[in-house]
Amino acid sequence: MIKKLPLQITTILLVVTQLSYGQTSGGPDAYGYTWRNSSDPNGPVFSWIDLNQLSGVITVTGLADDNLRGPFVMPFTFQYYWYQPSKFWIGSNGHIGFTNASVAHPFPAIPLPTGINDYLGVMVTDLTHTDVNSQPISTASCKYWINPANDTLIVTWENVPFWAPGSPGYSGSNTFQAILTSTDSSITYQYLNQSGSSASTVSFVTTGIENNSGNIGLQVLYNIYPTGGTAVKFYAPATTSLQINDASTLYCNNLTTGGLFLSANGNAYESMAEIANSGNQSLASFNVYSRILSSANTIQVRDTVPVSNLSPGQTQVVTFPDLWTPTNAGVYRHITETLLPGDATPSNNQRMLELQVIDTTQASMQLSFDTGLDAGLGGLSWNGGSGGAAMHFVPPFTPCILTKATFYIVANNLGNGFHALVFDDLGPNGEPQNLLDSVFVQGASVIPGAWNEVTFSQPLLISSGGFYVVWMMGGEEISIGQNQIPPISNRTFEVLGSASIFTNWADYRYREIEEVMINVFIEKVLGVNEGGSLVSFASVYPNPVTDLANVVYRVSEKSLVSYRLYSFNGQLVEERTLGYSNGNGMFSINVSTLDSGIYLCSISIGKNLINKKITVTR
């Protein structure tokens, strides 16, 4: 049973704690980073930078308990290990991530390949920005600032308390900041004050830096709180002898590699992925292998495509030539894997996308990412009985009608009920926005060890996009099932608070290894073909083109529009974000300076990613 206070400890972690205590410097790690604190004669001088006294400060909104916000654009080129992150996320628990992975208790030692990687552990501990009622704590804040010279980024967590059981849900106070400077690629942590302690006594705090594979990093403190009035600085090496040849698959099909529902005998599925040079050496052309497998591991379609030469940090979108039209309902996997000889980080070579093919001839269609088998862990629940979980569903066609959901309840020791809620996904980046329905299931009606069916107040029309179905505890000691049989959808969320007051959404901390057991049922809208979709393009004209290529599209709801233009060998030529659009729209691409040839325009509209070929002639 997952709680806020898991009881785990290992001998290894105790050794790390003892080694960290009393040190004033450390390193180098395998790349060459070292650190010194303000107690070291050659270390940094503690000099607090009060963002409240500066102009242009940005307040990070939406931080709560165990969540993160972003992405925010890295305002300058910042060298971190052998690569340059372009975006960053800010975590409620005191970390800055260069991926959208959150971190929650138990907090890992650094470095550690499993779990969260590629982050700055400024003061990673169980903090909260909201109280027991999920309301913002007025004294707690997080802000960031970019200096006028555009070479320094400062992120400050101010008066942020520890999470605590009971009312008001928090205790203590912590004020600390991270300073990233591009001129020398240094990272400085400063701690103004620290009072109180975590409710947990094991794996409760860590500070340090870690690279994108989790194999290299520097840990400053573990299970020891930083002292107020101190600073720690990480120094990047002027040169490094470490040569990293590393190719990675960033995603399959969509940015989060989120599982998809497809219609049997419906539209063809196009395999695509984004590949990156994640090392510090230029890479000659290498192959990328894509395959779709059935649950019996039978290959449905496969392609091997060469990627062009990539410089460090460069990416390439790969579209595989063979389309797949699924004919049989069932579970499939789309796997993309880089095949770079001598790859330094095999753990990032492969990404797997779950594909659920649905028989759309049925009157009622079940959408499920789990296999129906509970993992036997006691179920997911939260201390205090005021938390929950959610699944994001994007149906195989729209419009459709959502009629009911089922929830596998593992235990209900105190006879409490639960809430079933439905939200649309019309918020920024497809986040939940509008509540569509809320149903409370009385405790007397809950059947432990079984699927519990909830019929919504009325059939819900899903006209486009997708929706979130939320399970919220109606009290303590009720838990929902966890399924750990792959493939995994990466569409699970944890929701903290109560059914009447909650804004605390976060990626489920174990979303890469398990599903929360929530299923839904949809029906067709009579007279509508399931091939309908949110976005339809009228044309790209003229095509072939010599000067301006005009892209005309139609979108039925407000969506963010952007595009990337690639040469035929996959080199990025141009990218633009065009803002939000609703209804009919058009944008133009100036190709007058481009060489003759075929180009790929990858157009992003909301959650839709559509590729169009443009032929340039001279």
Image (cartoon, rainbow, N blue to C red):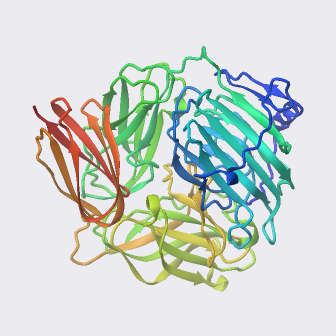
The residue that appears at 65% across and 80% down in the rendered structure is 417
The residue that appears at 81% across and 23% down in the rendered structure is 42
Q: Is residue 170 left or right of residue 116?
A: right
Vertical placement of residue 562 versus 582, above or below: above
Q: Position of residue 588 (x, y in %)?
A: 21, 49
Q: Is residue 116 visible?
A: no
The residue that appears at 75% across and 66% down in the rendered structure is 383
Q: Give whichever of 294, 77 is nearer the camera.
A: 77
Q: Give whichever of 446, 465 is nearer the camera.
A: 465
Seen as rendered, the residue at the extreme top is 241
Vertical placement of residue 5 versus 214, above or below: below
Q: Quadrant of the N terminus?
A: bottom right
Q: Is residue 270 visible?
A: yes
The residue that appears at 25% across and 65% down in the rendered structure is 532
Q: Position of residue 168 (x, y in %)?
A: 79, 71
Q: Quadrant of the C terminus?
A: top left
Q: Position of residue 463 (x, y in %)?
A: 33, 72
Q: Position of residue 601 (x, y in %)?
A: 26, 43
